[in-house]
Image (cartoon, grey):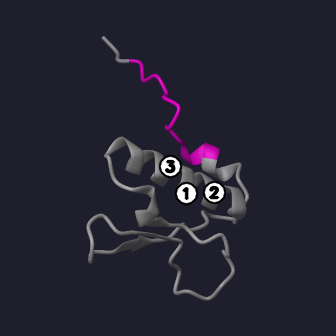
Amino acid sequence: MSIEFIRGPFDVSAADLGNLNAEDAVELFHQLLVAEAMGTARPITAINVPKAITTADGGVDAEIEPIPGALISGGLRAGPGK
């Protein structure tokens, strides 16, 4: 018996990401974070995803404040050949 995986509207594969340029990848990342925040009753104002992707910021592409005073930050990295 095999289980078939049905992709949902928020499922993104490595191949999907590989087809995006840097700006579109950041926009997708932003939209996914907003969708996650809305699904967990967190304010979307707690999400910061700057569109200035070439600014020297230590590699931070997104910041999320899950609770007041706490901050989670992360970044996107190009894969091989990017």
* Residue in front for this viewpoint, 17 or 40: 40
Q: Residue at x 69, y 65 (%)?
A: 81
**Which amino acid type corresponds to the residue marked 3 in the rendered image?**
Leu
Seen in the image, is 72 located left or right of residue 61? left
Disc 2/disc 1 C-alpha distance (Å): 5 Å
Can you name the residue that lies furthest to the top here?
Answer: 1
Q: How many numbered markers are drawn?
A: 3
Mark 1 surroundings: few (<14), some (14-19) or many (≥20) residues within 10 A? some
Magenta region, mostly helix, strand or loop? loop
Q: Residue at x 42, y 24 (%)?
A: 5
Residue 21, position in %: x, y? 73, 58
Residue designated by label 2: 27
**Secondary element at tag 1:** helix
**Res. 32 mark:** 3
Residue designated by label 1: 30
* Residue in front for this viewpoint, 12 or 18: 12
Dots 1, 3 in contact, CB < 8 A: yes
**Which amino acid type corresponds to the residue marked 1 in the rendered image?**
His
Seen in the image, is 33 located left or right of residue 29? left
Which image quarter: residue 15? top right
Residue 55, position in %: x, y? 66, 84
Q: Is residue 62 above or below residue 5?
A: below
Q: Residue at x 52, y 86 (%)?
A: 58
Disc 2/disc 3 C-alpha distance (Å): 9 Å
**Which amino acid type corresponds to the residue marked 2 in the rendered image?**
Glu
Q: Would residue 58 be counted in the magenta stretch? A: no
Which image quarter: residue 69? bottom left
What segment is highlighted magenta in the picture? 4-16
Disc 1/disc 3 C-alpha distance (Å): 5 Å
Residue 71, position in %: x, y? 33, 75
Seen in the image, is 59 located left or right of residue 81? left
Dots 2, 3 in contact, CB < 8 A: no
